[in-house]
Image: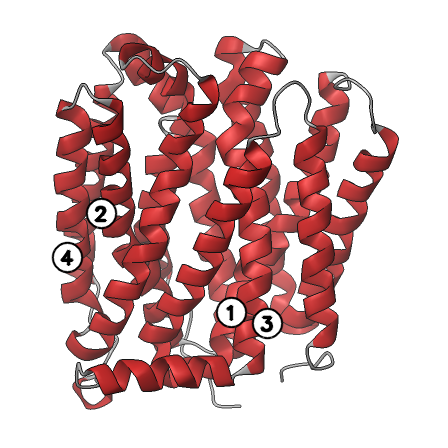
Amino acid sequence: MQNQPALKIEFIAIMALLMSLVALSIDGILPALAVIGNDLGVTDTKDHQLLITMIFLGLGLGQLIFGPLSDSYGRKPIIYVGFLVFAIASIICVNTDNYEVLIAGRILQGIGLASPRTLSIAMIRDSYEGDYMAKVMSFIVMIFILIPIVAPTLGQFLMNAYNWQAIFNVQLGLGILVIFWFWKRQPETLALSKRLPFKTAVLISGFKAFFKEKQAVAFTLISGFITGSFMVYLSTTQHIFEVQYGLGDDFPLIFASLAVGVGFATYLNGVYVVSVGMKRIALISLAAFNLTSLIYVVVFFNQPNPPLWILLIFFVLQFFAIGFLFGNLRALAMQPIGHIAGVGAAINGFVSTVMGVVIATFIGAYVDTTVWPLFLGFTVCGFMSMVIFLLNKPLERTI
């Protein structure tokens, strides 16, 4: 294997912040879902989930647009275009008094944010490969996970001190700062010699090349099931903690504490992935994910919600496993398609995100009076992921 370039702290920080714009836009409004719904006349509290799931739908659609464009015109210019779309969408969200228009604005936000989210991954693949790419992804995800720790608290503060529109304004302002740093300090990673002409034939060949790679397809599907599991949690967490458990203002603290477990897991993954191997870590973590959810489903079948501390133990175990999965699954999917990193990242992100939206919308509709349907969804998604994983080629240690 060729020598890998040294890990650059500033590169990791910039890529992590680009990806974190998505988390900030999602987690920051979680404490405000009920207030936004009340202000805009939403009567069914389950419709609040649309403010979360629809931005993911936009993310899925946007990746198909910006990924192929970046393979032709470079990563940086397309990130600027995507951020401009996000900025326009944020202005729409701030100034509307119609819930349907707000949902449309959230979809448009997702389309715009797909650019920095997808192309940061492509830039990582431009610069690293193999277990080193997984190592970089783990450190980036570790920083990325810090956002859910602070975003709900920030969102609640802004809502209480000003209004829910202030959350969107601050998100846009922070995004401008990140893009300025990116423009000033991050070089282009896709050399002119490696750029592909933007032609329909090139796009079609890119899609064909992706779906010919068994590993890319398999781990994209697994990513979809795990993303869907996490998306169900994101879209129902406010309902679970504020409605089912009546926590109210304590919700941001609970949400942040669970995010710490994911961040710690991604840190450990970054430390050990090169020596242990990303496939082996992913398999062990997937087994733990399945076991945890299955235990909950069996023990609490046809039972009311357990005490809060028991639920939190299960969530911590579940998300600790997810922390090991996110970076490794994406790296495993991207590993064989470095020659089409832009298109590849777009397809990977589109498929996993759309799968996640469908899974989250379906399962979320059943998370009403108890958390049990959520863990049943975890179990089904985990089982399907394990089947796909085991049907893929045997474990290999990357050297």
Q: Which numbered disc flags the more N-terminal residue, 2 or 1?
A: 2
Q: Tell me if mark 4 has few (under 14), some (14-19) or many (20+) residues whose alpha carbon lies within 10 angstroms of its own.
A: some
- Residue 331 — which label? 1
**As drawn, is 374 to the left or to the right of 248?**
right
Q: Which numbered disc flags the more N-terminal residue, 4 or 3?
A: 4
**Which residue matches tag 2?**
178
Marks 4 and 3 sit apart, C-alpha to C-alpha, by 31 Å
Question: Please, what secondary structure does the residue beneath circle 2 have?
Answer: helix
Q: Which numbered disc flags the more N-terminal residue, 3 or 1?
A: 3
For marks 3 and 2, give the one nearer the viewer.
3
Quadrant of the drawing holding the C terminus: bottom right
User: Which amino acid type is shown beneath numbered disc 2?
Assistant: Val
For marks 3 and 1, give the one nearer the viewer.
3
Residue lying at 63% horizontally and 82% vertically, measured from the top left: 398
In the image, 233 versus 130, the foreground residue is 233
Q: Tell me if mark 1 has few (under 14), some (14-19) or many (20+) residues whose alpha carbon lies within 10 angstroms of its own.
A: many
- Residue 80 — which label? 4
Residue lying at 37% horizontally and 85% vertically, measured from the top left: 339
**Which residue matches tag 3?**
218
For marks 2 and 1, give the one nearer the viewer.
1
